[in-house]
Image: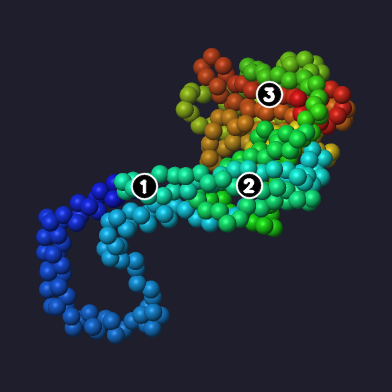
Amino acid sequence: MIFWLYHREKESNSPQAAQISNADASSEQNVLSSNGTQQQANANTKTSATAAAPKPFQTNSATPQQRFRALVENKNTSIKFWGLVIDQDGNPLGGVKIDGNTRTWYITDTLGFDCRFPKVSAVSDAKGKFEILNASGDDLTIKMAKEGYELEPNAKHGFGYHTSERFSANPNNPIVFKMWKTNIHEQLITGEKRFHIVPDGRPYIIDLIKGTAAESGEGDLKVWVKRPDSIVFGQRYDWSCEVDAVNGGLLEENNRYSSMFSAPVDGYVPLFQFEQEISSGWGDSTGTKRFYVMLGNGREYGRISIELFAYYNDQIPGMIHLQYAINPTGSRILRP
């Protein structure tokens, strides 16, 4: 877009464009002269607030090169960042080395544009806090390291300040990073399953340890989906579904950057319900939902990622797509 504007501006400064511009200006001057009396009368009726309004930016006062330079350089903004590093137990973690870079735009010698990546660095203090100041650009990328610790894999690394993200830093609300001791791991029961179902409201019992689903028996989750019987692809309809934690609970995780390595102590609810109506923003699946699960009245903990389909295709009426990781020891640690 920048190159297009630059070359378009060059064309507008050609002799032909200048002749057109002069002709338009001459015509406009005649109109102004003939209507001068009326315009003066209109001007006298303006309020003082209107008269004091700032004049719009006159783009024609700058050369094409100056405007091109301003467009590129205006992509850069002041970058300030405040972060907090904690360990797996939520305690402040000092001595963490933070390295990264910003992306800064500039004009090349050939009147093109490119970007540099100046380095930034910091070290967390005894309270786990760190800050990055006196930097500029439109994007910040950071990484961190401390011997004996690892950053959670889903942690957010990039922050767009003058991009579509429009990230805004706040010293009173620092971005939290969690690091785990490298020797903390658990043997988890994991799996990924796609269960074909009949979405007429009948319940399906899912055993997360065995990785099975059946219409009867014992298990950890009870799931049902209900929609009209006869539908065709593209048709809209009302439908509903439910996920019930048998003798346990569910706790939804809405932070997409969470690695879900530690199940919370409380906050669980017995079930998750979902209703989709034609009149609302419609879809034939729940979308991916992530939950911590408490099983067997607190004897086991885990995490699941589940998506329920009221309609999948002509051959598969409905589906349960499930990924899970369960710690059978009773520990709330879910780091593999």
Marks 1,3: beta carbons within 8 A: no
Answer few, some or many: residues within 10 Å of disc 2's Cα (few below 14, many 20 plus, some between 14 and 19). Answer: some
Mark 3 Cα-neighbour bin, 10 Å: few <14, some 14–19, many ≥20: some
Q: Which of marks 1 and 3 is in front?
A: 1
- Judging by the rendered image, the residue that carries numbered circle 2 is 121
Q: Residue at x 34, y 68 (%)?
A: 56
**Depth check, front residue: 34 or 184:** 184
Front one among 79 and 107: 107
Other-residue count near label 1 (Cα within 10 Å), few / some / many at <14 / 14–19 / ≥20: few
Determine whether the residue tagged by mark 1 lies in a helix, strand or loop: loop
The Cα atoms of the two marked residues, 1 and 2, are separated by 27 Å
Q: Eyeballing the image, is 149 above or below 110? A: above
- Give the quarter of the image for residue 307: top right
Q: What residue type is labelled 2?
A: Ser
Disc 3 designates what residue? 323
| Callouts 1 and 2 close, C-beta under 8 Å | no
What separation in Å lies between label 1 and label 3 (alpha carbons)?
A: 50 Å
Q: Which residue is drawn at 26% across and 63% down?
A: 60
Residue ID for mark 1? 108
Residue 218 appearing in the image: yes
Distance from disc 3 to disc 2, alpha carbons, whole Å, reads 38 Å
For the point 67% across and 18% down, which residue is it?
193
Provide the secondary structure element on which disc 2 rests.
Answer: strand
Spot occupied by residue 239 in the image (x, y as percentages of width and height): 60, 31
Residue depicted at x 28% and y 50%: 6
Image-quadrant location for residue 170: bottom right
